[in-house]
Image (cartoon, rainbow, N blue to C red):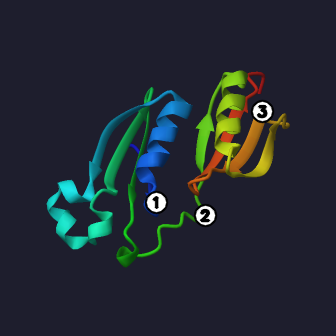
Amino acid sequence: MRFIAYLSFDGRCREAFEFYAKTLDGEIVDMIAHGDTPAGEHVSKDWQDKVINAYLKVGEAELMGADSPPEFGDAAMKGVSISIQIDDESRAERIFNAFSDGGTVTMPLEQTFWAKKFGMVKDRYGTSWMINCADGQK
């Protein structure tokens, strides 16, 4: 068994996943629009080009997501964060800064009692991230 986070967006999934692929040095393996599936008939004309499924791989890590049409409920992500465990301090800083641009920093990326660097940020797409650059001594 494995767990893969599945994120919901309000119409900006494609933009978010392209940003995540670039920021995290990942690869978008799949990106399908509502209108390219039989389910397309169940969403409005304005949502035909929105994403029904996106799949990103970053090394062994995976992230999935989709645009959630308004008629199917609220797309807001609440009470969930994606935690990135990373050894490279400069890469952690680069990722945190990219997510911070246009986002909201909840906790600055800084040294803690458990990590060389740890920070929390909600990016411009509404996804909450925790960046943890572990202290190898603990």
Position of 12 relative to 68 (above/below): above
Residue receiving disc 2: 79
**Disc 1, SS:** strand
- Check residue 117 in the rendering and tell me which mark sits there, or answer none: 3
Q: Is residue 56 left or right of residue 127?
A: left
**Disc 2, SS:** loop
Judge whether residue 84 can be spotted in this image.
Answer: yes
Give the amino acid at mark 3. Answer: Lys
Residue at the (62%, 34%) spot, across then down: 85
- Check residue 104 in the rendering and tell me which mark sits there, or answer none: none
Say which of marks 3 and 1 sits in front. Answer: 1
Q: Earlier in the sequence, mark 3 or mark 1?
A: 1
Label 2 CA crowd tier, 10 Å (few <14, some 14–19, many 20+): few
Residue receiving disc 1: 9
Position of 91 relative to 32 (above/below): above
- Residue reaching furthest left? 38
Give the amino acid at mark 1. Answer: Phe
Label 1 CA crowd tier, 10 Å (few <14, some 14–19, many 20+): many
The answer to which of 51 and 8 lies nearer the viewer is 51
**Gap between marks 2 and 3 measured at Cα:** 22 Å
